[in-house]
Amino acid sequence: MRVGRIGYATVWDGNKYVQCRRRSDRSLRCEAAGTVLQPSLRSVLTGERLSRLAALGWIIDPSFGNYARTFAADVPDADVADAILQTLAEVYGADTASVEIETTWVVDVPCPPRNGFSQNLAGLINDARSMRATAIHACSYVAEPATTTKAESADQLIATYGTTVTAEIQRLRINAARHVFVVFGAGIGYVQCMPDKQSAEIYCEAQSAESWSALASILTPERVEMLHKAGYADPGRAPNYWKNYPLDKYSDAALAREILTLLHDVYGYAGMPALKISTE
């Protein structure tokens, strides 16, 4: 025990996590990641998987959109561990052979700080200094409505989605040694990125007409030239245009800005429909 602080144990794979703490009656309350603070999990938490989550005893906690389950004080720790790994594997598709585990002590207040919207491990109770700038200091969270304003420029698109895309690039950087990726889908055209395990770089692809013929009318020679000026090579190594971003030369925010600029200027994406983010 540490006076004035509460211990939390977190098991995670990428942004898929379960976090638990002991309560005063020695029961164990756990939360599993939800889509309110992590929109990218919508492609993971399908209707079938949400049904499986409910069958395993998890219920939605409307405060932050995570899923909660309480284990009685007399449930053996080994059984709790098995239940957590079962949830991560069967519902979230996590690789249980490579999950990470961390324990931390957080200030004991009624509404402890949580990682903010679309940040790495969003919704996690965490008072780490590195996450304080975007942390949520409240007892509940209501998602902002999706934008219905057309982005007239790349700067406007960045203002709308810059924080979200930056957080996903940050996730790739943090998990660079693992098999992680992200796809930024604009309805017509996408940019997808993943760490290059052979070097300290992020490898990205911009969709080409070779991989989807409908783009032939979008990717005019002038727009392809924009990709070339941004440093993207022609299809060959892959069916798409591609580029490696050295991590020591690009900040997460700078890479996010370039991706959104390409989506706007090359693919004509103006923010509608909402940017679709898919992950592993």
Image (tube, helix red, strand yellow):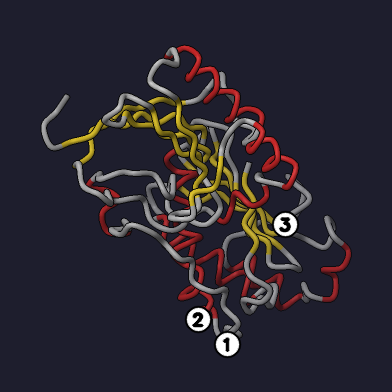
As drawn, 159 above or below 186? below
Q: Residues within 10 Å of mark 3 (few under 14, many from 20)?
A: some
What residue did someone put label 2 on? 156
Pick the quarter of the image with the C terminus.
Answer: top right
- Determine the secondary structure under disc 2: helix
What residue did someone put label 3 on? 234
As drawn, 33 above or below 185? above
- Earlier in the chain: of badge 2 and badge 3, it is 2
Residue type for callout 2: Gln
Pick the quarter of the image with the N terminus.
Answer: top left
Q: CA distance from mark 3 to mark 1?
A: 28 Å
Residue type for callout 3: Asp
Horizontally, residue 2 falls left or right of residue 51, namely: left
Task: Determine the residue positioned at 19% across, 42% down.
Answer: 107
Residue type for callout 1: Glu
- Determine the secondary structure under disc 3: loop
Horizontally, residue 125 falls left or right of residue 239, namely: left
Q: Residue furthest bottom?
A: 152
Residues 107 and 171: in front is 107
User: In which quarter of the view is residue 6 placed?
Assistant: top left
User: In which quarter of the view is residue 227 placed?
Assistant: bottom right
As drawn, 237 above or below 266? above
Residues 133 and 154: in front is 133
Task: Determine the residue positioned at 56% across, 18% down.
Answer: 97
Task: Determine the residue positioned at 42% across, 40% down.
Answer: 174
What residue did someone put label 1 on? 152
Q: CA distance from mark 2 to mark 1?
A: 7 Å
Q: CA distance from mark 2 to mark 3?
A: 28 Å
- Earlier in the chain: of badge 3 and badge 1, it is 1
Asked if marks 2 and 1 touch (Cβ < 8 Å), the reply is yes
Asked if marks 3 and 1 touch (Cβ < 8 Å), the reply is no
